[in-house]
Image: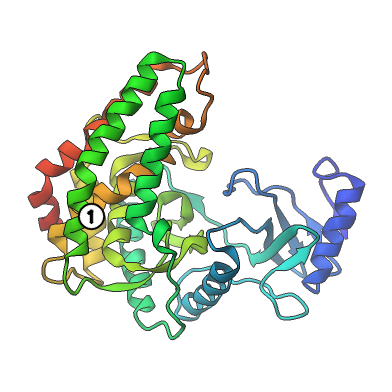
Amino acid sequence: MQQDDPQNSTQSDLLDLNEVMQAFGVSEWTNLGTPDHTLDGELFQVLVESQGLRYLLRERPEGLAESENAQHHYAFQRYLSAQGLPVARLRLTEQGEPCATLGENIFELREWVEGEPFDSGDARERAWIAAAGAMLGRLHQASRQYPGPQYRWPSEVQAGGLTQGWLNFARGQAEQSEIYAIGAALSNLVDAWEAALPAAMMAIGTGRNLPECHIHGDYSAQNLRFAGREVAQVLGLEASRWEKRLLEVAYGVFSFAGLQWQGASGLTRPLVQRGLDPERAAIFLRAYSSLYPSVPGESALLVDALTLVAPIITANGPLEDIFYGSASDEDMPIEDALDRLAWATALPGWLAKVRRSFAEMW
C-alpha cells in the first residue's frame, strides 16, 4: 500500500486500513485522502485508488432496524444500478458480501463518481432541480418493477409516528432551554404543527389507491451529485423502505423549494422568507410528473404530505443547531434563530393557503 497523505492516519490506522482493503481483495492501493465533498458527518471516509480505479472507503452509517435494512438497501441499490440509474456499485468482499466487518466497525467500498454538490447559488440551480425531479421519477418507475420482498419500517417510525417523535423532542428542548425566547418559540412551533398534523395524517390515511413502492428514503439535495446539468450520482439509500410515493415527492419538493443549500458545507437555511418557493416547486414537480404523473386524488394530498414531512426536514436542516445544540448556548445568534423558528412555525398556515395551487403543479 502506498500512502500519499502521511497526516491522514497514524501507522496503526494504516495497518487497520490495509486489513480493511484486504477484506475486499485489494492488496495494492493508494490513499488519496478525504474527498472534497463528504457526507455522513463524523463517519470515516477516504478516497482510494487501485489498478486505475477509484473507490470511496467509508464506515457504514447506522440505520433503523439495521440488520434487516442493510440487506434490503444493498439489494435495492444493486437493482437500481442494473436498471441504469446512477447508483454507485459496491465492491464485494472476498466472501461476496457488500460490506466488511472488522471488530465493531463495518466498512463499504463503493465506486467513486465525480460530481458537484447541489448549491442554491449556482447558475445551473433550476436545471439541477429539474434533473432531480426527473431522476426521482425514474427511480420510482424502476422501483415499481422491483422483484424483491417489501421492506417496511416498524409502525412507530413510519411517517406520522416519526414526525410526532420529532415534535415531542422539540417540546422537551423547549422545556429545557435556558434562553426564554428560544424556549417560547419552540413551544409555539410545536403547537402549530400539532394542530395541523392530525388532519394531514387522516387525509393521507383515507386516500385511496395511492401508489406505493420502495422509496429512496432521503431524497434531498445533499444526496445527489451533478455533472453539467444532469444528476451524476444518487447517494444515501440507507433509509429506503416501502412507502407511499406521495410522501417522498413531498420530501423532494420541500428539499429543493424550501431550503437554501450552501454547497459542500451541507448547511441549509430557509430559501424564502415565508413558506416554499412556488417556482422551484413547479420545476421539480413538472419534471417528476413527465415520467410518473399523479393518480386521481393524489395531487390534492400533496400539501398534507408536505405538512407531514416538514417537521422532520426542518429539525434536521434549518433548525438543526437549535434542536441539537446546547440548551444554554450563549453564543447562539438569537435573532437569526428566532427568524428561522418563525419561518417554521408559520409553515402549516402557509401550506393551507397554497393547497390548490400546489395540487395543480402535479
Q: Position of residue 229 (x, y in %)?
A: 38, 56
Residue type at the position of mark 1: Met
User: What residue is shown with label 1?
Assistant: 201
Relative depth, front residue between 310 and 169: 169
314 with respect to 35 (left or right) = left
Single out the residue that lies furthest toward the left: 356
For residue 133, what is the image quadrant?
bottom left
* 36 to 181, vertically: above or below: below
Q: Position of residue 202 (x, y in %)?
A: 19, 57
Kindly identify the residue that appears in the image at 29 percent across and 42 percent down: 258
Q: How is the image coloured?
A: rainbow
330 with respect to 90 (left or right) = left
Quarter of the image where the C terminus is located: bottom left
Quarter of the image where the N terminus is located: bottom right
249 with respect to 58 (left or right) = left
For residue 206, what is the image quadrant?
bottom left
- Tell me the SS state at disc 1: helix
Residue 318 in view in this figure: no
* 181 to 166, vertically: above or below: above
Kindly identify the residue that appears in the image at 45 percent across and 37 percent down: 262
For residue 158, what is the image quadrant?
bottom left
Kindly identify the residue that appears in the image at 44 percent across and 65 percent down: 153
Q: Position of residue 52 (x, y in %)?
A: 73, 68
Q: Residues within 10 Å of mark 1 (few under 14, many from 20)?
A: some
* 341 to 8, vertically: above or below: above
14 with respect to 134 (left or right) = right
